[in-house]
Image (tube, rainbow, N blue to C red):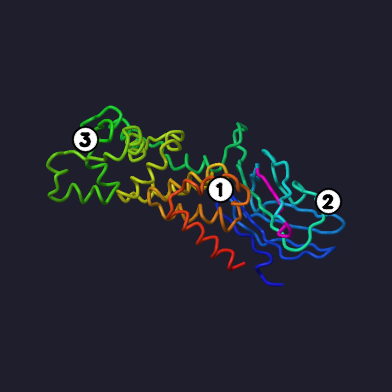
């Protein structure tokens, strides 16, 4: 049997195992696949019924507290899916913690989809468990004295020496801070450009609220809810001013919570704002992982009003993917 029979394809929160055939009285365990902080396994056992197990390969303490949706999609017929009611905040330690027993006969090829809604770990001080995705972002926020001082410099306008003009307001900032965070700003302030003489930067395609969030990130004082609200605008400005860490943080976060409810809107925005990495990821989620079939009606409506170039790209991706099956 080829190695591909055991391979699980993944995005940041979605795992998909394609099984071409599973004879009676058969057991199969997938290769490990990485989701969050853990390597995971899926296993299937077919006897009179089908048993599906999902479990982490624990090599350390603090097992995951998982929330996920799992479904089995049979390729025979009308691609009807068997959907588990869902798991919420269940701690998974071994291969007996989650078992799905399916009595419906499945023949031919079928696909197992696992979509992780959240993964949490227990807090050492016995407080509420923390989401690893929220935690990953918060850990990047330094609580050092230096960052506190930078935050005060911005919030209290201490010795600001440059003004940023957004679409609906202005805010003061500091040349040195901007220049050390962005090679574009560094070049702008080092050469004989109008921004150097006028001590202003015009970013008129950005609202003052998004601009404030952008500066808060640069000065080390952005809050999680603020980041979530403005992450698309932050992705754009990070790309424009070559701030790689902010760009990567936005990119990863915009992928981490992708689901069938928001993927079409995200796909449209990534095309509109010319964000090819995001667009490619959303396209893969829809087409390669077959999520188009889960939102067939919404997708048909989307095609009626979406950008024509984007529609053409989607169909090119569908044809290329199906040709390879």
Q: Residues within 10 Å of mark 1 (few under 14, many from 20)?
A: some
> Which contiguous range is marked in magenta?
68-77
Is 105 displayed left or right of 301 in the figure? right
User: Percent position (x, y) of residue 291?
Assistant: 60, 51
Task: Report which residue position mark 3 lands on.
Answer: 163
Tell me whether the residue at label 1 lies in contact with that at label 3, contact meaning CB atoms closer than 8 angstroms.
no
Secondary structure under tag 1 reads helix
Counting residues from the start of the chain, the first of labels 3 and 2 encountered is 2
Task: Report which residue position mark 1 lands on.
Answer: 299
Number of marks drawn = 3
Task: Report which residue position mark 2 lands on.
Answer: 103
Q: Is residue 140 magenta?
A: no
Whether residue 88 is situated above or below residue 294 in the rendered picture: above
Counting residues from the start of the chain, the first of labels 1 and 2 encountered is 2
User: Percent position (x, y) of residue 235?
Assistant: 39, 46
CA separation in Å, label 3 and label 2: 67 Å
Secondary structure under tag 3 reads strand
């Amino acid at each position: 049997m080829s190695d591909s029979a055991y391979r699980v394809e993944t995005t940041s929160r979605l795992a998909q195992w394609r099984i071409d055939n599973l004879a009676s009285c058969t057991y199969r365990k997938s290769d490990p696949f990485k989701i969050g902080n853990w390597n995971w396994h899926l296993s299937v056992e077919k006897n009179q019924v089908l048993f599906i197990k999902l479990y982490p390969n624990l090599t350390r303490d603090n097992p995951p507290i998982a929330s996920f949706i799992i479904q089995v999609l049979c390729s025979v017929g009308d691609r009807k899916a068997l959907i588990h009611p869902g798991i919420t905040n269940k701690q998974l330690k071994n291969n007996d913690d989650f078992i799905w027993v399916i009595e419906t006969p499945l023949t031919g090829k079928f696909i197992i989809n696992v979509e992780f809604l959240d993964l949490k770990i227990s807090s050492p001080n016995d407080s509420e468990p923390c989401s690893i995705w929220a935690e990953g972002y918060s850990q990047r926020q330094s609580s050092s004295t230096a960052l506190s001082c930078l935050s005060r410099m911005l919030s209290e306008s201490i010795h600001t020496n440059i003004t940023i003009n957004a679409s609906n307001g202005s805010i003061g900032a500091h040349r040195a801070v901007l220049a050390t965070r962005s090679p574009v700003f560094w070049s702008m302030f080092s050469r004989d450009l109008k921004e150097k003489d006028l001590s202003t930067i015009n970013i008129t395609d950005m609202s003052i609220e998004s601009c404030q969030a952008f500066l808060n990130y640069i000065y080390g004082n952005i809050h999680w809810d603020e980041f979530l609200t403005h992450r698309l605008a932050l992705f754009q400005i990070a790309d424009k001013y070559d701030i790689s860490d902010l760009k990567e943080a936005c990119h990863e976060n915009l992928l981490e919570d992708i689901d069938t409810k928001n993927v079409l809107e995200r796909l449209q925005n990534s095309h509109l704002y010319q964000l090819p990495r995001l667009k490619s990821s959303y396209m893969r989620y829809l087409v390669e992982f077959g999520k188009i079939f889960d939102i067939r009606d919404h997708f048909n409506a989307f095609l009626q009003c979406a950008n024509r170039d984007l529609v053409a790209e989607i169909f090119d991706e569908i044809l290329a993917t199906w040709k390879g099956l």
